[in-house]
Image: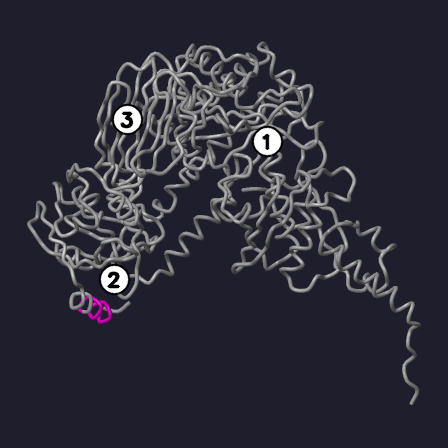
Amino acid sequence: MDIKRWTAALALSVAFAAHAMDVSGPQGAFALKDKPRGGQPGFCAEELAAALKGTLGRDEVSHYPVVSLNGRRILLSTTSALVSVDGKIVRLQQAPSASDGCLWLPAEFLTAVLPQVLGGPVSVKGLEAKAAPADAKPESKPETKAETKASQDRGDRVVVESVVASDSVRITFLGRAALLGEVAQGSKDVTATFSDATLVGNPGGLGKGIVDDLQFEKGGHRAKIQLGAGFRRFESVKLRNPDRLVLLFRGEGQRVVSPAPEPPPAPEPIAVVPPMTGEPPKKSSAFDTVVLDPGHGGPDTGATTVGGLQEKNLTLVLAQKTAALLEKEGIKAILTRNTDVQVPLLQRTALANFNRANLFLSIHLNSSPASSARGTETYYLSRNATDQWSSQLAAKENTADEASGATGDGGLNLVLWELAQTSYIVESAALAEAIQQEFNALLGTADRGVRQAPFVVLEGAQMPAVLVEVAFLSNPDEGKRIADPAFQDQVAAALVKSILAFKARNEKPQTPPPQP
Amino acid sequence: MKSPRRLPRSLELVILAAALCAGFASCRGKEPVPASQSQAQAPVQQAANAAQRVLYYPAGEDLLLAPCTVSMVPAGTPQQDMAALLNRYFDGPPCDGQVQPFLEHSSLRALYMVGDEAVVDLTGPVRTGGGSSTETARVYGIVETLVQNFPQVKTVRILVDGQEADTLLGHLDLSRPLVPEPRLLVRSARRATGEGEAR
């Protein structure tokens, strides 16, 4: 796009914009014209770059738009709400968009991204009625039905999620407005009130003990968490990237209230899902942490045997037994779930990423319409699928009508951020082969081979990651065998043996290249 | 000039009924016919128009997708042909040694093209069951069947009851368009489709 068109568009936007946002930060105060899109306040990146004596251009590798400010490089995408600030990813609520000579950015960019670039807090005035700055304090007042309707109409939503561990329950409120939540503790409950947002989500399967119930009240503006007899204390913390309010309830133990009368009983939990709050744990380069992911859980039962055994319970037992053996080998094992709860697939790999695990292993049991099918299958992420998705995203970016000029590198990282596993395909394939060989010997079956497919639970893992389908529950023999605790021990031992072999291979010092 | 000789009215009716029946079967997929049988049984008019299509079902111990050739009467537009082929798919494999990955009453709700992407909207108990093998067979049975038979189809997106679904059975990512996975095909089919080994 030529300079004249940009200049003309900028002049037009200045001439016709009705409202201004007064921005003040470490580099002084300036004003931006409010250009709402889709009901959301925002502004043109060109105007921001001009106000802060920065530049707007395009990354030469990925063709993503790049704003350079204060010596920092902000990589943007018009198909994603992710923003990269010198490689650090920030998630916005709304993706930038390009049209009419304006690269539009949502107003929250000013409070979510700009402080990192300018090195200090940034405040915005002129948006109070539409989008309060994240660090603003909401006014506390009783809410009428009309006000409730009005705030719902504004479209601010807070998504509620929960993770239940054996000794804690974590409830997370996600969304920009979550940072405005007010938390209060009563004698039997804890409430979180969001005056300017509507709660959405279905955090079911909480069980009983520490937390007995979670209900939405006041037209979806308040979450009331009913405390159980096992409750001891709770912590709340507000975090950014993504914006969220996390309530962590601790106590004597949370039990799942599920009728599932199914054997075998799970042994005592080995590991507890640690909350993903605060800074990630510091970690050396040594191979010392593995995340084990028992497949399915909660209402998602997975496959079943003819006799009614459910995959979700068997995978949990196998993961717990494997974790116990790994701990004996001096390897920290973290489970994505320790009880019969449903954990979102993306959250499972997020836990592994947060803990900087060396390896992610998702444990499943298979099923087939052919009851004769038997043996182990080990999967790693498909390059076919991810290549296709990456190229589609890149193509969309390339066709976006945006400015060009600046140079840089690393743009494709933004595309691949959600497909992080693509960087570990080779290692994952090696791990899959190791597991497959071990299980072929254990089960004495013909090699079903290592396979590739686009598994959701593997896509975001920033470490070698595989999914193993240990045996077929649909096969009467294997279905019986996998319920046998002695065989479960063998399966756990085989998994640990594979992991140790992988560890040994990756810790082996590299042979120096031959001297010329 | 001698006018062309008309067929007896009773024979006309028989041929018309046969053609309607054949057309109905191909659209509804009620009677999947292997290519070898169809040539012997199909009416003369149907055989002349029939096209060879290949369905991909899991087969053998390893449950990789194996081809099964059937004869289909063109249903009209390419989209109608695709829909007819998938309807036939849901009736199960007419070839020996293959299994039907879908449960009974699974069916095609709609099919349409967006550019080179076939959007396949499924309904019925398509999300019932478990196991990666079942899920990959269901998903890639459809993907391979469409992509290998219709060159204009490059990717396939699967919906359930008109809605986007994260997965069918908790494993495969359905939020994005799917491309064939050669390693899920039997080795002979990889060669036949020109697909090499997975990278």
Which residue corresponds to the image point at 46% horizontal and 30% vertical from the top-left? A465
Residue A95 in the image: x percent, y percent? Answer: 31, 51
On the rendered structure, is B32 left or right of A200?
Answer: right
Nearer the observer, disc 3 or disc 1?
Answer: 3
Mark 3 secondary-structure assignment: strand
- The magenta segment is A4-11
Mark 2 secondary-structure assignment: strand
Which residue corresponds to the image point at 81% horizontal and 64% vertical from the top-left? B48
Q: Name the residue under label 2.
A: A102
Judging from the image, mark 1 belongs to the subunit labelled B
Which residue corresponds to the image point at 61% horizontal and 32% vertical from the top-left? B129
Residue A51 among those drawn in magenta: no
Instruction: Name the amino acid type tagged 2.
Output: Cys
On the rendered structure, is A257 left or right of A233?
Answer: right
Mark 1 secondary-structure assignment: loop
Instruction: Name the amino acid type tagged 3.
Output: Leu
Q: Residues within 10 Å of mark 2 (few under 14, many from 20)?
A: many
Q: Residue A247 carries which label?
A: 3
Residue A157 in the image: x percent, y percent? Answer: 31, 42
Q: Residue A239 carries which label?
A: none
Judging from the image, mark 2 belongs to the subunit labelled A
Residue B85 in the image: x percent, y percent? Answer: 69, 53
Q: Name the residue under label 1.
A: B130
